Image (cartoon, grey):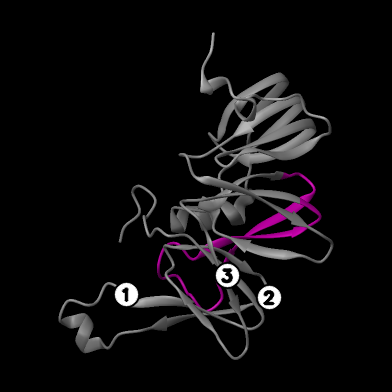
Amino acid sequence: MQSELFASENMAQPATAPGMTRQNSKSLKYAVNGECLARQGAMIAFRGNLQFEKQSQGVGNFIKRSVTGEGLALMAVRGQGEAWFAHQGANCFIVDFAHGDALTVNGRNVLCFDASLSYEIKMVKGAGMAGGGLFNCLFTGQGRLGVVCDGDPIVIPVSPQAPVFVDTDAVVGWSAALHTSLHRSQSIGSMIRGGSGEAVQLKLEGEGFVVVRPSETRPAGQAA
């Protein structure tokens, strides 16, 4: 049987070492030898002796997720084998964490990660309880994190001289050391007259970077 479907770049190859690799631009492969963590429902295929179990978030994280409707619903993948992860055809990327690294990521953009990484669902400083999407996941430690992005990401440097303002529905993640606050970019009068659709942004200040996606689509069921 002949077809470009069977091109070498589309063929799954046996893993040469445990851990996360990029299968292609839309999926990641994890060679499991023990345990990894992934977003619930993200597994698209696996081979070997693997078990998938819902991961408890802890009382504090569960309350935060209930308040916001978001958070990070995880499953633990245990055993020996290979699993492939993807999410709605989004682009996939791998972030390598060295000792001392810290990254804040929107829960909707987390795909899978090493069990050696620590994570905590935290409220964005300065954002209060407004917006519904301002609880994000802080990752620290050493290991690899797989993230997804609708479209090609834009990485914007942030410096003390040049703060950056981002739409809360478009933000993927940012350097954990950055200072965050809410910024109103239109007057009350303009809002009364119907508004511009760009009323409030997340302001990031300090030294680092922010990643945004070229989409402002809200998760299903989340109020505007």
Name the quadrant containing residue 168: bottom left
Q: The disc labelled 3 sits on which kind of residue?
A: Val
Numbered label attached to residue 210: 3
Where residue 209 appears, as percent x and y from the top left, is 62, 72
Residue 6 location, x and y as percent? 57, 20
Residue that carries the numbered disc 2 in the rendered image: 177
Element type where label 3 sits in the image: strand
Q: CA distance from mark 3 to mark 1?
A: 18 Å
Query: Which of the two discs, 2 and 3, labels the residue nearer the N terminus?
Result: 2
Q: Which quadrant is the N terminus positioned in?
A: top right
User: Residue 145: where, in percent of width, then height?
Assistant: 69, 50
Q: In the rendered structure, which amino acid carries the disc numbered 1? A: Glu
Q: Secondary structure at mark 1?
A: loop
* Label 1 Cα crowd, 10 Å radius (few <14 / some 14-19 / many 20+): few
Residue 129 in the magenta stretch? The answer is yes
Q: Does residue 29 sit above or below 178 in this rendering?
A: above
Q: Is residue 67 above or below residue 206?
A: above
Q: Which mark is residue 198?
A: 1
Q: CA distance from mark 2 to mark 3?
A: 11 Å
Of residues 65 and 198, which is closer to you in this image?
198
